[in-house]
Amino acid sequence: MTKQIEFTDHIHYNGGLCTVQVRGRGESADNRLDVEIFSADTEGQLTGEGHLSLPVGALVPAAQLLPQALTGIAQLHGINVGKLPRTARGRPGNSFQPWTSELDERLRTAWMSGDELLSAYELTGRLATEFDRSRNAIRSRLARLGCDPDIPGRELTVATAPTTNAINLDNHPG
């Protein structure tokens, strides 16, 4: 069986955008994944790039070593990792910022008129980048706006809402 992997994600940092793209295809544990990293400034000009090609079996050790290596290199360049701003620690720049009615309307319009070729995951990722928020923040806000966060273009109704196994505390013996 052939397995294909394609993944792209973005993170904003002070003065730019960092993009990671992962691609892989193969039939055994000896397969390789290609990881490309790009950074661009606020005008979209490429400021850095890198490429890794790893066998699947080396992914876990590489995932443990890369953060240590990059943190050490940042410290060598005088960046105090313990005092980085939130956005540099991986949180989107608008995390914990209030939503305005204008942002709500933009989000709702984008979701309800979403490209039918995009999955909810892909569209949520695009909106997270556009609004500089996390995917979870986008999904949560969509539900508050009456949009089904699992299906682009669909409203959240009683019929489409997930069911829960909530306990009715009025009748609970405890």
Image (cartoon, rainbow, N blue to C red):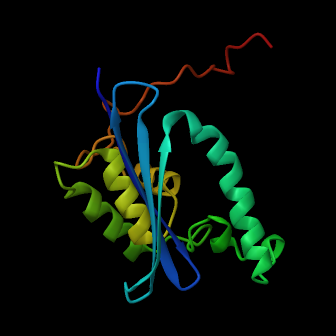
- The C terminus lies in quadrant: top right
76 lies above or below 110: below
Q: Position of residue 4 (x, y in %)?
A: 31, 36
Residue located 51% across and 65% down the image? 133
Q: Nearer the viewer, residue 57 or 156?
A: 57
The single residue placed furthest to the left in the displayed view is: 116
Q: Position of residue 142 (x, y in %)?
A: 40, 53
Q: Quadrant of residue 71?
A: bottom right
Residue located 51% across and 51% down the image? 136
Q: Quadrant of residue 83?
A: bottom right
48 lies above or below 166: below
Q: Is residue 77 left or right of residue 118?
A: right
Q: Nearer the viewer, residue 10 or 119?
A: 10
- The N terminus lies in quadrant: top left
Q: Quadrant of residue 168?
A: top right
Q: Is residue 61 left or right of residue 161?
A: right
